[in-house]
Amino acid sequence: MKNNLPEKNAILQRDREKYLIAPSTPGGFVDPETLRKIANVAEKYGASTLKMTSAQKMAIIGLKEKDLDAAWDELQMEPGMVLGTCVKGVKFCPGTTFCKKGQQDAVSLGMKLNDKYVGMKLPFFMKMGVSGCPSCCAESPIKDIGIIGTSKGFTLMVGGSAGLKPRLADVVAKNLSEDEILEIVDRIVTFYKENGEPKMRIGKLIDRMGIEEFKKEVGLWEI
Ligand code: SF4
């Protein structure tokens, strides 16, 4: 029976025949030439549909297994979907780069987090979201690590998740610069790497140990 092909970064579709691949388009930003290239590859190999996913990847849906290598060769792009228990793509909004409501630079921070963490192996999967203002277009409060821009800097939240039993992330620090966020996120990811368990997202770990104890462990004494 056919299955996903992690070595080709390809996901089996509902028809159990064709595959989806999704080249990396961090933040969902893409220039016209790249978008045309993605469309050309889809057309050349008979993929029926392109979809901008909720994780901001441009997915090509409906490729045959025999065409996967050629499609990736022609794209010359990094895979956007990482399979397994690791940091998934970072979702981020246009922030002060493009959005008139933006209060902080979500693109700069989102790109840095994306470059550093996507694909990093962890006890379970981890999602990150960076929003440039409290409108939270990147769904920061339901991300394992959620960041929100305000007029005074970034607010950092940890432990959010969606699903049938959603959990809102806890605010653990406020009014932070980009550098401070990067440093604290590093401590949080390291802590989770060393203390997390399979199938336990960081929100569950926080529930088990208590938010105050968690903050102490990652060096956040006050907010
Ligand atoms: S979160 Fe704010 S800055 Fe980001 S896209 Fe939404 S409205 Fe704009």
Image (cartoon, rainbow, N blue to C red):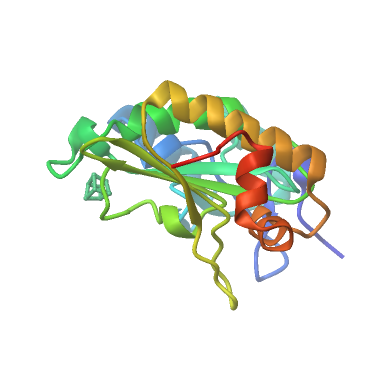
Image coordinates of residue 53 in percent, x first then y, are 46, 55
The quadrant in which residue 185 appears is top right
Residue at point 26% right, 38% down? 95
Image coordinates of residue 196 in percent, x first then y, are 78, 48
Left or right relative to 94: residue 1: right
Residue at point 75% right, 48% down? 84
- Residue farthest to the right, as pictured: 1
- Residue farthest to the bottom, as pictured: 164
Image coordinates of residue 37 in percent, x first then y, are 41, 33
Quadrant (top left, top right, bottom left, bottom right) of the N terminus: bottom right
40 or 90, which lies in front? 90
Image coordinates of residue 50 in percent, x first then y, are 44, 53
Left or right relative to 217: residue 50: left
208 or 128, which lies in front? 208
- Residue farthest to the left, as pictured: 100
Q: Is residue 120 visible?
A: no
16 or 207, which lies in front? 207
Left or right relative to 90: residue 105: left
57 or 166, which lies in front? 166
Q: Is residue 134 above or below residue 15?
A: above
How many marks are shown on the rendered structure?
Answer: 0
Q: Is residue 124 visible?
A: yes
Q: Is residue 2 above or below residue 108?
A: below
Quadrant (top left, top right, bottom left, bottom right) of the C terminus: top left
- Residue farthest to the top, as pictured: 179
Residue at point 29% right, 32% down? 32
Left or right relative to 54: residue 108: left
Residue at point 44% right, 21% down? 179
